[in-house]
Image: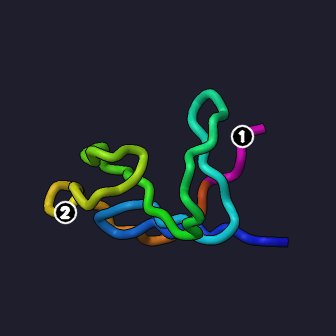
C-alpha cells in the first residue's frame, strides 16, 4: 500500500509527499501535473492558495513540534 507523509514545517507550510490526491470542497481534483510532493499554505498569505508560495516568510511563526492529542471524546 502506498503511503502519504505530511510534514508540518516550522514557520511554514504543510508538505505532502507520496500517494495522495487533493480535492476542492466539491470533490473536484486539482491537476498536480504528476507532482508527488507539494506544499500547502497554512498562513493564509499565499497568492496561490491552497498551495504555498513562500509568502509566509517573516510573517508566520509556529514551531512545529509533535505532541499527543488528548483522548477522543466519547
Residue at screen point 51% across, 69% down: 7
Would residue 68 be found to the left or right of residue 14 on screen?
Answer: right
Q: Residue furthest right?
A: 1
Dominant secondary structure (helix, strand or loop) of the stretch shown in magenta:
loop
Q: Residue furthest front?
A: 33
Residue at screen point 69% across, 52% down: 71
Compared with residue 46, is residue 61 higher up or lower down, i.e. above or below? below
**Residue 28 placement (x, y as % from top left):** 63, 35
Residue that label 1 marks? 73
**Residue 67 shows in this picture:** no
Front residue (pair 33, 50): 33
Residue at screen point 44% across, 71% down: 65
Residue at screen point 73% across, 71% down: 3
**Residue 40 placement (x, y as % from top left):** 44, 55
**Residue 29 shows in this picture:** yes
Which element type, helix, strand or loop, lies under badge 2? loop
- Quadrant of the rendering where the N terminus is positioned: bottom right
Q: Are marks 1 and 2 in contact (CB under 8 Å)?
A: no
The first of marks 1 and 2 along the sequence is: 2
Residue 57, label in figure = 2
Q: Give the mark toward the camera: 1 or 2.
A: 2
Front residue (pair 37, 5): 37
Amino acid at each position: 500500500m502506498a503511503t502519504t507523509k505530511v510534514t508540518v514545517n516550522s514557520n511554514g507550510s504543510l508538505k505532502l509527499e507520496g500517494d495522495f490526491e487533493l480535492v476542492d470542497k466539491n470533490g473536484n481534483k486539482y491537476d498536480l501535473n504528476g507532482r508527488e510532493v507539494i506544499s500547502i499554505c497554512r498562513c493564509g498569505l499565499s497568492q496561490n492558495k491552497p498551495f504555498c508560495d513562500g509568502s509566509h516568510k517573516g510573517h508566520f511563526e509556529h514551531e512545529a513540534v509533535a505532541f499527543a492529542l488528548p483522548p477522543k471524546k466519547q
